[in-house]
């Protein structure tokens, strides 16, 4: 017999799935061309909220190989192949760069943007390009934007976002909106054509992000969502419905939780991890890549995607329950090197 908790969760998931259809964030919606796209072996697309840009349901995250010094050639191959396969949304950040035993995090920052810039130099018009500022001030963010545009070899960003709003910053959000804050820098950049749209990101605390998007009309939000989300401080329950109501572009991250989702006897696959999140009312998901084989696997999953039922979502959630704390490292439930 089903428990009351399961019945309640099932109803919640059913409503989210229905919301996906109503808002156009479902690959079944007409006239989005899903059936035609599938017959041609192409990736389904969805609108990026009120921004209106159509993006593939699977997009490229600028971490892993792309943020690693010394892997410039591999990164360039990955980015080019991703675009060739139909990916038209690329996410990066001024802070992305992988530290090594000889290179500090500070020295590595900007690596991802530089590697993406090598391709943007000749393929800029083919993608919706998003980056981020980790500075919270006007002056600091404007300086970062100058570096970002130089690194990416472009004169504008489609989307510029406040990077990783954290729980400890909840009482400081109003200062980010003040005359010397990051939002004023974003508005200035937008007015001068250096930035088209404004967003915010975070993977630690949905309540803080909820406060932030209620304080300012952001165009887009990048949030952490995976199949273990419901077990601790849920983004899906607390933040996702609010972002949908505001018609924001919604981008999901942490889908395989830095591959930790596969560390427990293979009880969940990349297909399950991706299908779970793509069934929800999100515009697209981003995943960092180590190699072309991973890209090809993810592209195949995205091209063959069919929305799951509420019961199928529940079954996948249940598989993650025994080790959910390990999959919530980005919310502070287990140790992991600090990251932006």
Image (tube, rainbow, N blue to C red):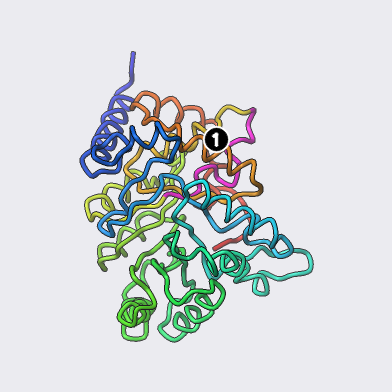
Q: Residue at x 20, y 40 (%)?
A: 22
The answer to which of 45 and 11 lies nearer the viewer is 45
- Residue extending farthest to the right is 102
Residue range in magenta is: 252-265
List x then y, in percent, for residue 160. Answer: 41, 69
List x then y, in percent, for residue 235. Answer: 38, 48
Quadrant location of the N terminus in the rendered image: top left
Q: Residue at x 58, y 40 (%)?
A: 296
The answer to which of 15 and 296 lies nearer the viewer is 296
Left-right relation of 118 to 320: right
Q: Residue at x 33, y 82 (%)?
A: 192
Location of mark 1 (residue):
270
Q: Kindly report the secondary structure that dominates the magenta region of the rendered protein.
A: loop
Q: Does the magenta segment cover residue 254?
A: yes
Quadrant location of the C terminus in the rendered image: bottom right
Rendered view: 126 above or below 280: below
Rendered view: 171 above or below 278: below
Left-right relation of 19 to 295: left
List x then y, in percent, for residue 331. Answer: 49, 52
Alpha-carbon neighbours of circle 1 within 10 Å: few (<14), some, or many (≥20)? some
């Amino acid at each position: 017999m089903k428990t009351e908790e399961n019945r309640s969760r099932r109803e919640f998931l059913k409503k989210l799935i229905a919301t996906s259809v109503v808002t156009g964030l479902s690959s079944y919606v007409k006239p989005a061309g899903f059936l035609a796209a599938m017959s041609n072996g192409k990736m389904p697309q969805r609108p990026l909220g009120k921004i209106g840009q159509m993006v593939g349901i699977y997009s490229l995250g600028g971490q892993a190989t792309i943020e690693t010094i010394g892997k410039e050639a591999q990164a360039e191959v990955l980015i080019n192949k991703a675009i060739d396969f139909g990916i038209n949304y690329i996410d990066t950040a001024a802070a992305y760069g992988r530290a090594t035993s000889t290179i500090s995090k500070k020295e590595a920052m900007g690596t991802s943007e530089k590697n993406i810039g090598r391709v943007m130099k000749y393929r800029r018009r083919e993608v919706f390009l998003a980056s981020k500022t980790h500075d919270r001030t006007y002056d600091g963010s404007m300086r970062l934007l100058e570096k970002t545009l130089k690194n990416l070899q472009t004169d504008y960003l489609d989307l510029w976002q406040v990077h990783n709003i954290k729980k400890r910053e909840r009482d400081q959000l109003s200062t980010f909106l003040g005359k010397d804050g990051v939002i004023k820098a974003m508005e200035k950049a937008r007015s001068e054509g250096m930035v088209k749209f404004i967003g915010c990101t975070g993977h630690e605390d949905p309540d803080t992000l909820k406060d932030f998007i209620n304080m300012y009309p952001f165009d887009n939000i990048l949030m952490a969502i995976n199949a273990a989300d419901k077990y601790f401080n849920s983004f899906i329950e607390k933040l996702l419905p609010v972002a949908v109501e505001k018609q924001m572009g919604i981008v999901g991250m942490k889908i395989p939780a830095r591959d930790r989702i596969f560390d427990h006897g293979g009880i969940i696959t990349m297909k399950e991890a991706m299908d779970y999140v793509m069934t929800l009312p999100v515009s697209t998901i981003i995943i960092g890549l180590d190699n072309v084989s991973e890209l090809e696997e993810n592209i195949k999953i995205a091209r063959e995607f069919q929305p799951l039922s509420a019961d199928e979502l529940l079954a996948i959630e249940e598989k993650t329950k025994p080790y959910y704390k390990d999959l919530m490292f980005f919310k502070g439930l287990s140790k992991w090197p600090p990251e932006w």
